Image: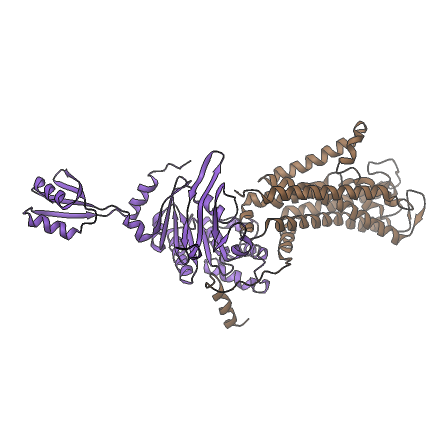
Amino acid sequence: MSPADLAVATSGLTKRFGTRAAVDGIDLAVPTGAVYGFLGPNGSGKTTTIRMLLGLIEPTAGSRTLLGQPMPAGAGETLPRVGSLVEGPAFHPYLSGRANLARLDAADRYADPWSARSRIDAALERVGLLAAAGKKYRAYSLGMRQRLAIGASLLMPRDLLVLDEPTNGLDPQGTREVRSLVGSLAADGATVLVSSHLLTEVEQVCTHLGVMSDGHLVAQGTVAEIRSGAVATIRLQTGELDAAATVLTGLGVTNVQRVGLEVHGLPGDLEPERIVAALVGAGVGVRGFVVDAPSLEDLFVTMTGEGFDVSG
Amino acid sequence: MSVAEKGVEQGEVGTRHTGSTATRPRAVSTRLLRSELGLIMGRRRNQMGMLVLAALPVVLAVAVKLTAPNREGHDAGDFLVQATANGLFVPLAALTLEMTLFLPMAIAMLSGDAIAGEANLGTLRYLLTVPVNRTRLLAVKYASLVIGALIGVTIVTVVGAVVGIALFGAGPMLTLSGVQIGVWSAVGRVALVALYCAAGIAALGAVGLFVSTLTEQPMAATVTVMIVTIVSWILLGVNQLAFLHPWLIVDHWMSFSDLFREPPLWSNLLQGLGQDLAYAVVFWLAAWARFTSKDITS
């Protein structure tokens, strides 16, 4: 894929804080029009990457382009086309939600002051905050704050949205709304880069996935490509374990082993139909046959490591 | 606005269809500066601060009125004693007092909010990704500090003049040289004093802006600026350190009394303005060097 087709591209992007590499030589490729799920546990380097993409911090090494323009040189032209949510919402506590958006709009030299009011209201409407627009930000709940931050990224028409953990602090209903919002933005033609430490929250809307672990990009591609990386296992229940194992090995199934009253193995590219046919053909009675493909979730855990340990 | 128009505008919101051309940015926009001033003036703490600034000349004038016949010496110098003869001396006495502590504290608080305050709230990262160019942001922030300095000094001066004239009346003014000047000439010179004081406070604002780029704690920036001010006043009071005095930001802040000689003594005033300008330029550039190369991790 040529760089021109990529909304976000990085090459060897690295950021060291002291001696520790928070992000270590990653090559992101977010195709134009994609909904890219940027996954990884807390502390795996997602936010640092996003900060580098947006020009907030300078990488130690490597380069990055946003909408075809190198950053940070192209920031003035590119960033007005990029809506972003970085590491949670941040607003002036003693201003209302509407006044906070007005302030951000005032800072944008591309924004037309005459349409500010209607654009701000439309953005508030889109995130369901219009009724609470006059309330002071400090009185907002975490979910409302998160919505306001998403609303701020929608003040202007955008070609790219970079949303860092947009579902943080939202209840299941809010999470679903954000998902459908992401879907509708993508349907309008925008590219969306959405990060999350929870696969389940973004899986359904993503066309592409990138998985971070401890500063490395351990997997990247379309959802189908990532899924195909999943190694299926077969589990055969039979009365003739030895004969079954011989047949399976003869077919090219690898890692064949007896587990209790079952025979397990890795079928590789072999079709399950052929395996069963061969077993029956050889006179092995098949009591049960299961092909186990690990879920995306299992894959994610395998790639990033389990548990609550934060990479540090 | 008709319903149809509204629908069209709302339809635009959210995404731009690929291939559409971006409109040109407005070359000059005062929206951010106006938003900045709104933020400063709308903040309750700053409103209280302005009340404090305004209260001092009132207290001074009333105190002088109540003890009118007593012309004993006073800290605010000759101005306060002369206030009984001419109300226009009240703003001068008030500025003499407020330039030492209250006005520097006001600008110290505003400059703490400027960058460190936004970093502390996290709003800095959202301003920068709008995007606001970092140099432009520093320019707007400093412009708002200069305007803040002007507003603070103007409050003291105007309230002082109004209360002074109300209590003591205005008339031809007896200058320090013993020559009388007309009332309008006196008003003009009071206005010049206000501008001169604002220049000093604005220069201190540049120091504050620089400190503000060093920290994410607005209070730390404010305290640092106050320490700089207080230490400067202390050093200025030590005659053995005279060689150091031309380098102090407060060196000529009190020279505005030279405007009340006839003719005015310009040399100290011009030197004072030169010092203010030097401080403003050096510290704004230091802030720029720091801020434009800084990783924003807040």
**Is residue B62 placed above or below A3 in the rendered structure?**
above
**Is any atom of residue B83 visible in this view?**
no
Q: Nearer the viewer, residue A161 or B101?
A: A161
A192 left or right of B227 in image = left
View extreme (front): residue: A2
Colour chain A appears in: purple
Q: How is the image coloured?
A: by chain
Q: Quadrant of residue A247?
A: top left
Residue shown at 63% from the left, 44% from the top: B288
View extreme (left): residue: A283
Residue shown at 47% from the left, 64% from the top: B19
Quarter holding the C terminus of chain A?
top left
Q: Nearer the viewer, residue B188 or A185?
A: A185
**Is any atom of residue B278 visible in this view?**
yes
Residue shown at 62% from the left, 55% from the top: B32
B202 left or right of A172 in image = right
Q: Position of residue A22 (x, y in %)?
A: 45, 39
